[in-house]
Amino acid sequence: MEGILWYVLTGTRGGANRIRILRELADRPRNANRLAEELRLDYKTVRHHLDVLVQNGLVEHSGTGYGAVYLPSGQTRQHWDTIERIIAQVNE
């Protein structure tokens, strides 16, 4: 899991936005539109990052389509300390 986290959060250009999205979802589940508003990102950008996070097992969703609500997966919650360590190392 640590390798996946490093790749998704730091190995690509979108890592910073994925970190922001994960942090927002850790506070409470949200749909893509709400995330876009709160993070001041384009809706399509948020959808892209959510798709990447879902494909890598970091985020799951409840519902379908526009109203789908996203939340961190159980595996992400179990490895939250690793995520925080990665964030700290990136921000040094």
Image (tube, rainbow, N blue to C red):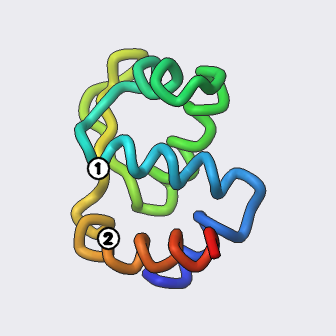
Label at residue 26: 1
Q: Taking 23 as reference, is 79 above or below it?
A: below
Q: Quadrant location of residue 10?
A: bottom right
- The residue beneath circle 2 is 80
Give the total number of marks visible in the rendering: 2
* Category of crowding for the residue at label 2, using alpha-carbon neighbours closer than 10 angstroms: few (below 14), some (14–19), many (at least 20): some
Q: Residue at x 47, y 83 (%)?
A: 2
Q: Residue at x 62, y 37 (%)?
A: 48
Give the mark, 2 or 1, whose residue is nearer the N terminus.
1
In this view, the residue farthest toward the bottom is: 2
Q: Amino acid at mark 2?
A: Trp
Instruction: Please state the horizontal and vertical placement of residue 7, each as a whole percent of the image.
Output: 63, 73
| Quadrant in which the C terminus is drawn | bottom right
Give yes or no for contact between labels 2 and 1 (Cβ–Cβ under 8 Å). yes
Q: CA distance from mark 2 to mark 1?
A: 9 Å
Q: Amino acid at mark 1?
A: Ala
Q: Residue at x 43, y 81 (%)?
A: 1
Q: Secondary structure at mark 1?
A: helix
Q: Secondary structure at mark 2?
A: helix
Q: Residue at x 31, y 30 (%)?
A: 30
* Category of crowding for the residue at label 1, using alpha-carbon neighbours closer than 10 angstroms: few (below 14), some (14–19), many (at least 20): some
